[in-house]
Amino acid sequence: MNKTVEHYISELLFLHDCVILPNFGGFVGNPQSAKLNRTTAVLSPPSKQILFNANLKTNDGLLIIHISTQEGITQEVAKTEVEKYAAKITDKLSNSKILRIDKIGLFTVGKEENIIFLQDSSNNYSLDSFGMTATQNKAVLREAIIEKKVAATIQNIRTQNNNPKAFLRAAAVIIPLIALSYISITQQDKINNVYTQMASLNPFESSIITEPIAAVIPEVKIEVEATPIVEVIEEEITPIIIPQKTYYIIAGAFSEKKNANKMLAKLKKWNYNTEIVRGENLLRVSYNSFTNKADALIALHEIKQENSAAWLLTQ
C-alpha cells in the first residue's frame, strides 16, 4: 500500500466518532468543548477525546472500505492488509508490553493484563477547532476598574460639598461687603443734602435726618452643586450557541441494502426505534437515537449486555 493502516485510521477519526480496527479494538471519539484553565489563563479550543475499547473487534467495514477506495484495491486485498497489521501490533504489544501508533496514541499493558491507552496530544481530531490553537491571555477585570473609578469620583464630590466650615468663613466676609455696598448706594442722596445746607450758612434752617439708616441685607441664595450620577455600563455577553447533535447506537454497518433491511426488520420486531443512517458507502442500522449524550451512553451500556459490538455514532 502507498500509505500505512494507521494513517487511514487517523483520517477516519476526523470524520467519525468510532473507527474499528478488526481483531484489535475500536477507537471512540468523545467531543470536548473549549476549556479555560483559570490557573494558567490558557484557553484551549474544542477537541475530541479518543478512547480505546478492546471489545470492539468486529469488522464494521468502515476502515476496509476507506482503504480500498483510497488505495484503488479490492476490499479483499484491503481486508488482508488490515488483518496483517492487526496481528503485527497485537504480537508487539503482547511481547514488549508497550506499543505506539503514530498520530493516535500509546498502548501499555497493566499488571492485570488490561490495556491502557493514552491519546497522542499532537493531533486535534475535532473539525470545530480547525485553524485554532491554545492561547494565553491575562484576565481583564473591567468591572473592578469601573467600580474603583466610580468610588473615587463619589468620594471627591463628597469631600468638596461636605466642608461647612469653609463655607461659613466665606459667608462671613462676603455678606458684610454686600451690606456696606447697599448702604452707600441708598444713603448717598441724604448725605449730599446735609452738605448743601451747611454751605448755605443759614443757621435757622435745620435739616435733620429723621429716617434711620438701615442696613438691608439682601437674601443670599446658595446653590449646591448636585452630585452627578455615574452610570456603570455592563458589558453585554453574546451567548455561544452550540449546535444540536444526534447520537445513534449502531447495531451494524452494511454495504448492501438488503442486509441492512434484514437487521432493520429484526430490531423493529424487538420494539426498537430503529432507522438506517447513511454514511460513506455504508448503511448503518441503529437501535435508537438520542439528543442527549448521557442518555445515549446509558442505553449503549444496556445494549452491550446483548451486543458487545454496538457503538455510538454522533452526527
Image (spheres, rainbow, N blue to C red):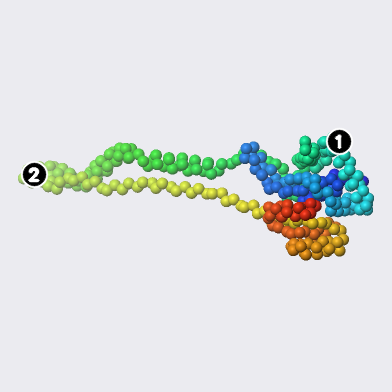
Q: Is residue 299 above or below residue 85?
A: below
Where residue 290 sits: x, y (%)? 71, 58
Where residue 190 sits: x, y (%)? 17, 46
**Mark 1 or 2, closer to the camera:** 1
Q: Is residue 118 above or below residue 298?
A: above
Q: Secondary structure at mark 2?
A: loop
Task: Name which residue type carries label 1.
Answer: Asn
Q: Secondary structure at mark 1?
A: helix
Crowd class of label 1 (few under 14; some 14 to 19; many from 20; radius 10 Å): few
**Residue sitting at x 26%, y 48%:** 218
**Camera-side residue of 10 and 185:** 10
Quadrant for the C terminus, please. Answer: bottom right
Task: Report whether residue 90 is seen.
Answer: yes
In the image: residue 71, left or right of residue 214: right
Residue lying furthest top in this view? 96
**Residue sitting at x 70%, y 45%:** 45
Task: Report whether residue 120 is seen.
Answer: no
Where residue 273 sits: x, y (%)? 74, 62
Task: Name which residue type carries label 2.
Answer: Asn
Where residue 121 sits: x, y (%)? 75, 40
Q: Is residue 14 above or below residue 117?
A: below
Mark linked to residue 202: 2
**Camera-side residue of 275 and 239:** 275
**Residue sitting at x 78%, y 45%:** 52
**Residue sitting at x 62%, y 40%:** 38
Q: Identify the residue under disc 1.
A: 95
Instruction: Give the quadrant of residue 262.
Output: bottom right
Q: Mark 1 or 2 closer to N-term? A: 1
In the image: residue 4, left or right of residue 128: right
